[in-house]
Image (cartoon, grey):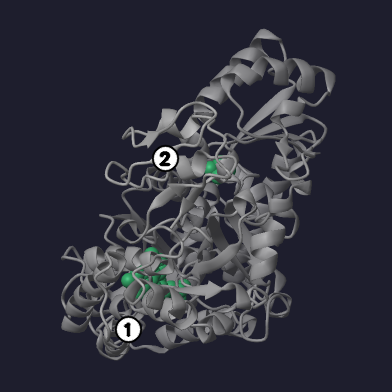
Amino acid sequence: MKQIKTISDLEDLRKSILKQRDPEKITIRMCLSTGCRAKKSTKVISALENELTNQGLHEKVEIKRTGCHGFCEMGPIMVIEPANIFYRQVTYEDIADIVFETISKGNVVQRLLWKDSRTKEYTKTERDLPLYKKQKKHVSYNSGKIDPTDIEDYISVDGYSALCKALSTMKPADIVDIVVASGLRGRGGGGFPTGIKWRICSAAPGNRKYIIANGDEGDPGAFMDRSLMEGDPHRIIEGMIIAAFAIGATHGFLYVREEYPIAIEHLSLAIQKAEEYGLLGNNILGTGFDFNTTINKGAGAFVCGEETALMISIEGKSGTPRSRPPYPAFEGLWGNPTIINNVETLGNISQIILKGADWYSNIGTSTSKGTKIFSLVGKVRNTGLVEVEMGTTLREIIFDIGGGIRKDRRFKAVQTGGPSGGCIPISKIDMPVDYDSLREAGAIMGSGGMIVMDETSCMVDIARYFLNFLLFESCGKCIPCREGLKQMHHILTNICEGKGEKGDIETLTEIGHFMISASMCGLGATAPNPVLSTLRYFHDEYIAHIYDKKCPAGVCKDLFEYIIDKELCNGCTLCKVRCPEKAVSGEKKKRHRIDPEKCIKCGICYNLCKRKAVLVI
Ligand SMILES: Cc1cc2nc3c(=O)[nH]c(=O)nc-3n(C[C@H](O)[C@H](O)[C@H](O)COP(=O)(O)O)c2cc1C
Ligand code: FES
């Protein structure tokens, strides 16, 4: 290893790395990110290494331990190159077949291919999977392809070229200008123009400035930032160094929640390696520019993702927000000008520097440039990480990429923007996904959570669920947020329990608008979104709960009963056998009945019955 001092040093290193590679060599890319590890991908790799050694193939095959491929639901995931064969849900018991059939003979093991649950067709290659086909992977491009623990693998795919270009050929103001011209907006939620924020900070008086990468990611169900940090940590560090050079910062913090141990491990290693290669530390690339960065582990409070709370937490105090102004770009960490950017925002920087502002601003819509990573979860067939061009419609994301709704049920709504986002109904399915369209629809981009709901989701219960989360996570410092959440949650709970009253809808609306205007931080100001958006689009469901004492989706347990339809039931006994409360009675081949006194409404019978004979009334 040698220290990189110039662009030509980096080029020489890249050439020598690529020269040592044989493009024809079989490479097995195996995901070792959180999702696949949870499904024992480490065990699969050990079995693979043993089998290749036993078969004398270990020198002919390279195993690459990668980050997330995005299709975590199908993990552990393995891709065999150069044929690009995609195997899913691989276990150590499949290894002998993979080595014997695919590695030795070039055959495909059909049972390990992804199968479309509707057409029953198999897809052989990763590039042809519906989940990936309509995606535009820019920021997440390397994740799943490179080994995130190997700096040279990152360098081999143009890693740190943008840093070299920025430091050796550009002035800080040029970098700020290019980021402004690109139109990049913050991916952490608010969508503030990144370049403008950098310009404000670089002009702010002060000798000491900081840059913070926000990897807190507290939204339930979201894992975009975690996957990026685990799968391509150098991209974030490179973005941070460029940002630091642009604004004149000499120290940075990567704020990552403690619950993300693999992200912390990979980022720590990346920092260590970047220092060893001379890309971090003193006199970077011989330019005289000094920059160091450290990792700050967050304790997992949702509110600590909010920029002022996050900075207070880094300062070693209890992480609660403060009112703004002053904004961090003027007065941030320890009173010094500070830039705080989401990790995905920083992940865009190297591409903008390398390919230019025009290239970037041609991607996306007139006001939302580039791509956005979403974690597509819920009742959709294909769940996972999805990176799409801004302006892609909800229909394309949910139906073309996500494969539509599971069990052929009807699409009802999609919740975007995490717990304080809004629920968008089917009437807006052709809406382009960008900052402004989402806001107009009463939702927000947030950091990129996308939860799909079908006809079995009760929108009042959904609103209550998110409010419950926010109530728990509110720091309690300001009264509108603390008391508003408590009251709204109380009213929603009553409605779900059949105790809703006339005037509840008006009170919810009034409190919601008050919280938006009076809360101190973004948590309280956006918390009413789930309630206000469901009131806007699913007003009938609130009416049914409050006045008819009915839950049309059959979710709120106090408002419905299960019965068995006498025409449809053929007495198969499945529900009777599986009912945990022995609430179902009836003889074989005769109509069954549910005892409402014993039924706990767990829904097992409803979900089991193939004849759809269990009805919700
Ligand atoms: C309650 C709350 C939680 C937040 N959590 C995050 C988070 O986990 N990650 C993040 O990048 N931004 C989060 N934000 C937004 C940050 O305050 C800040 O706007 C963002 O990090 C700025 O980076 P950007 O300009 O690149 O988006 C949160 C905001 C609020 C109000
Ligand atoms: S964790 Fe393996 S594909 Fe996401």
**362 w.r.t. 134: above or below:** below
Q: Quadrant of the N terminus?
A: top right
Which of the 4 image quarters holds residue 282? bottom left
Total residue callouts: 2
Q: Give me the C-alpha separation between circle 1 and circle 2.
A: 37 Å
Classed neighbour count for the residue bearing mark 2: other residues with Cα under 10 Å, few (<14), some (14–19), many (≥20): many
Residue 126 shows in the view: yes
Marker disc for residue 505: 1
Residue 209 shows in the view: no
**333 w.r.t. 58: above or below:** below
Measured as percent of width and height from the top left, residue 495 is found at 29, 71
**Residue topped by disc 2:** 593
Q: Quadrant of the C terminus?
A: bottom left
**188 w.r.t. 56: above or below:** below
Q: Residue at x 41, y 63 (%)?
A: 291
Is residue 336 toward the left or the right of residue 371 in the image? Answer: left
Dividing the image into four quarters, tell me where ligand 2 lies: top right
Q: Amino acid at mark 2?
A: Arg
Q: Amino acid at mark 1?
A: Ile
Mark toward the viewer: 1 or 2:
2
Marker disc for residue 177: none
Q: Nearer the viewer, residue 537 or 260?
A: 537
Q: Nearer the viewer, residue 433 or 255?
A: 433
Q: Residue at x 43, y 64 (%)?
A: 458
Element type at marker 1? Answer: helix
Element type at marker 2? Answer: strand
Q: Nearer the viewer, residue 498 or 474?
A: 498
